[in-house]
Structures are given as structure tokens and as C-alpha cells.
Amino acid sequence: MKEMSVLFLGKDGDKNCIEAAQFCQDNFSNVSVFLGKWGDSFPVDWGNWSYIISYLSRWIVPNPIIQMARIAAINFHPASPDYPGIGCNNFALYEGASQYGATCHHMAPSVDTGEIIAVRRFPVFQTDNVDSLLQRTYAHQLVLFYEIVQSILEGKELPKSTETWTRKPFTRRELNELSKITAGMEKEEIARRIRATHFGGWKPTVELQGFTFEFRD
């Protein structure tokens, strides 16, 4: 067991987060785990950790907390560097991306802007929808997590990727706009938006003559 302290931040109820957190608890001597949902208050205001690991975390980690990591504060982002921010796989599907991925990067005060450690890419298929792309992303992200944490356990320095973020992070406002279908849109545009935003209980909205309707299959 590695004599290190780790703060692990993740998504409540997610099986991959639970698996990743358990791996940390099994392999590091001192691990604090916090799992949360959107809207939960940030759970930590002090500490002294070797590493801070954010894995699908619903929190934006404040810079004073980031600075508490003695070695590194790293985040596992469920997208390639082409898609920082929120709604990453939605925008990848909308744009017809041929590749997607998962990214490990150093945390910075601004979301998804820190130096990139490693990227794991995979193809996007024509048959992919939000659910299938998301599940494959999570699978590749977990593999990337094991690769990076194994390097830490072996006492190696974190890798340095030559890749960089290619754009500003997508925002909640941009994702909300992507979910709208309005009168006058071309059939192809409507199809792209449905593919990109139709997922379980989440559906695009239709705006017509001042009224907003939920899209129905």
C-alpha cells in the first residue's frame, strides 16, 4: 500500500466512480472519498493531500483546495480535448465527430483548462447515440484512470501530453440552445439535434409560435 493521502471527488451513484474510489482506498494509506450530485455543497474546506483526484465530480474544485495538493490535483474528463466543459458528448454527436475520448489533466482555477496529462481516444460510430457514446466513454475513462493511478503507485512522474485544449469550454447555455428545435429548421438540422440531445428522460424541446413543447418520439 502506497503511503500517500488522497482526496477523491466523484459522482454519487455512479458504478465507475465507486470502483475508482475503492481502488484508491485499496492502494493508498489515507483516502477521503466524497461523492455528490449536481447542486450539492462542496464537501471539503481544509486538508493536506498528496493528490486530489476528481472523477466525474459534480463540483468545481475551488482554487484554494487545488493548491492543497502537495503533488498534483488531477481531473478525469469524459471527453477528448476537443470538447471541454459541459455536454461534451452531445456536441461531439451534433458535430459528427469521427473520434472522441477521455482526458486526464491537471486542475486549474478555470474548468477544463489545465495542462493535459494523457488522452485515450476511440472512434465514434454512425449508429452511436448519447447513451452508447457515454457508456463507451466511461469505459475508456476508467481504463485511463487505472493507467494513471498505476503510474502514481509505481512512483513515476505523471505523463505530459503534447495535446492541448482546442476551444473554450462549452457552457450550460450552449447546451440548452442545442436542445431547442424551432420552426424553419431544416430536416437534417432537426435530426442532428435529436441525435445529440435525446437521452432517457432528457429530450429536446420544440419552440413554435411562442410556445414550448417537449419532443415526443
Image (tube, rainbow, N blue to C red):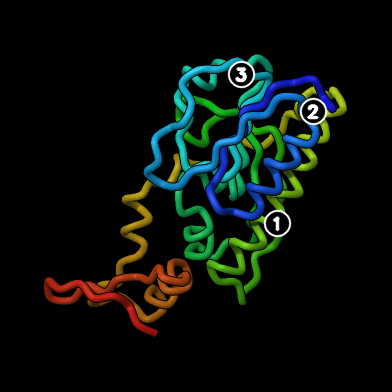
Q: Is residue 22 above or below residue 215?
A: above
Tags 2 and 3 touching, CB below 8 Å: no
Occupied quadrant, residue 122: bottom right
Does label 2 or label 3 sit earlier along the sequence? Answer: 3
Q: In which quarter of the image is the C terminus?
A: bottom left
Say which element carries label 3: strand
**Residue 32 seen in render:** yes
Q: Identity of the amino acid at label 2?
A: Ile
Q: According to the image, label 1 marks what residue?
A: 139
Q: Name the residue under label 3.
A: 69
Q: Position of residue 51 (x, y in %)?
A: 66, 24
From the viewer's side, name the closer residue of 101 and 72. Answer: 72
* Residue 127 against residue 121 in the figure, above or below: below
Give residue 152's mark.
2
Quadrant of image for the N terminus: top right
From the top left corner, tell me how far across and down residue 182 is, in percent: 25, 72
User: Mark 2 or mark 1, which is nearer the start of the sequence?
Assistant: 1
Binning the other alpha carbons within 10 Å of mark 1 as few (below 14), some (14 to 19) or many (20 upward) gives some
